[in-house]
Structures are given as C-alpha cells and as structure tokens.
Image: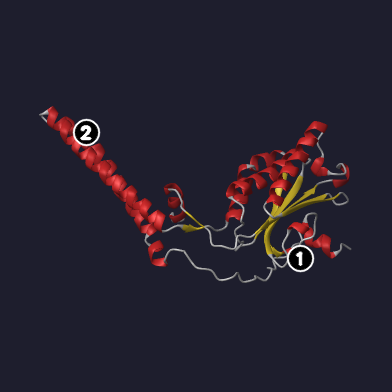
Amino acid sequence: MKNSEDRSENIFFLSSQATPKTPLPAEKDFSPSPNSVSILPFFLELTDRIRGSMAAMKTLAFYSRENFRDKELGKYFYQVVTEDIEKTISLLDCFFEYLNLNNPVKKVHTINTMLEEILKEKQTEFEKKNIRIVKKQFEADLPETSLTDEQLSFILNSIFDYILFSSPLNGGMGILTRSIESNQWNGEGKEHLQKDTKYIEIIILLKYVNPLRQVKDPLASIPSENQEERMDLILQLVKKTVENQRGAIKTKVTTKNGMNLISVVLPIERRNVFQFLPTADRHKMWKKPD
C-alpha cells in the first residue's frame, strides 16, 4: 500500500479538497469604484462604433472629392474632413487613456493563465512526443505571486522545456496549482520558506508508459552527455531563480511506477496588484462571449 506522502504527491489521486484560506491582513483598498469600472465596456463599444463611422466618412469623402467640378475645392473638402476625423479619433484615444489611468485593472489568475498559455504554445511539441495532458486541477482563486511576470514566465517555460527535451516518448502529464501552508511542503530548500506562511504550489507530474523500460531517471534520459549537462543546467537556473525569490523547488523520481514529480513553491503577493492594460487587452477583457 502506498504511504500517505506518495499519495499526496500523486496528482492523479489528489482530491479537490481546498486548503482553508487564512484571511489576509486588512489594507487600504486602492481599487476603482464599481460604478467607474462598469462604464468601460460601454465606452469601448461606443468607441468602436464611432471609429467605424469615422472610417466610413473618410472613405466617402475620398471618393466624393472627384465629384467636385472644382478639383481644388474637392481636394480642400477632403483635407478638412480628414483633419476633423483624425482630431476626433485623437480625442477618443486621449479619453480612453484617461479612463485607463484612473481605472486600473486588478491583477488576477496570473499563474493559471500563464500555464494555460504555455501549454497551448507547446501543444504540438507534446503531441510529437505523445505526452498527453491527463489532468489539470487549477485552484480557482489562486493568489498572485510576488514574482514579476518575466520571472514567472522564465521559470514555467524552462520547466516545460526541460520536460520536453529530457522525457521519453509516451506518457501522461498532470498539473496542479494550489495554496498551501509552508509546513505542508517537504523538500530540499524548505529552510527558505517562512514559518506559518501561505505559499503557492505548482505541481507537474509525469507518468510514463512501460516505466521498467526507461532508464533510472527518466527526467534526465538524454542520449548525449553534453545534452544531459545542459538539461541539468536548466533546472539549476530555475532553482536559483526560485530561491532568490524566497521560494523552493523539488524533483522526485519513482522508477518503479514511472512517475516523476516537479514541485515549485512560490511566495504569495499579499498586496492587491493593479495594472494598466493596453487598448487591445482591454477589448479582449470586455469582449462579450459568442
């Protein structure tokens, strides 16, 4: 019978029981008022309609200038209309930027969203190695991490690159994100974690077909010694980055059942983080579902 530690680390047996949430200390709320945020989707819709009308007017003016008997007058007409349209569009852009600066968007779901994006980007590579995503279990209200987006992207992309370059063919992969207490995590580097503090854990578990045919450490099974050294260097760089940000990482290989685990623990950002989104991202956020 498997012991409790093995079961807790096996993502295929992890239950959906949520860890009780510890309330964060109260802090001043700098978030925009609901009323001001609620007008943004209407303004974006209005902006789109006005821009469309302006573009149509500019096109109409362009073709209408040829209908003037006085060609100079037609040219002047087109110039005046075009300038007015461009001024109106500039005014709309200015007003939009004003709303953007005064109504920042609260940063949420960063880790889960980034994982989904990376998996989508690397889907073809996983398919080539016949590695299927068997299970994804993402905590719905996962807190934000204190790491920057660039640091988080480096860590996650490097881990999946390591998996792709070093893992054998045929297998299943499970991914889990959750909030944990520091005393719930056991692994090398635990001394870097603060006691009685909540952290974010990202678990990536791989299970290979015909595990007995694999080498002792499937995560490091590279034909070339030079390639193996490069793969190990990737994990070392990831480990260094994680530990520099007060986190920890562990890997575990179970050759008997062909399971390999990578667990990353990251510190939680206890402040509310707001960001200013570009126009294109704002449109995506407020776009109505089809």
Q: Residue furthest top?
A: 71
Q: Quadrant of the N terminus?
A: bottom right
**Circle 1 residue:** 183
271 relative to 129 in the view: left or right:
left
Q: Amino acid at mark 1?
A: Asn
**Circle 2 residue:** 63
Q: Is residue 150 above or below residue 141?
A: above
Where's residue 181, x and y in %?
71, 65
Give 126 or 93, whichever is nearer the viewer.
93
Identity of the residue drawn at 70% across and 38% down: 128
Which quarter of the figure has residue 8?
A: bottom right
Where's residue 249, x and y in %?
75, 52
Front disc: 2 or 1: 1
Tell me the SS state at disc 1.
helix
Q: Is residue 154 above or below residue 109?
A: above
Q: State how far apart marks 2 and 1 are (Cα).
A: 73 Å
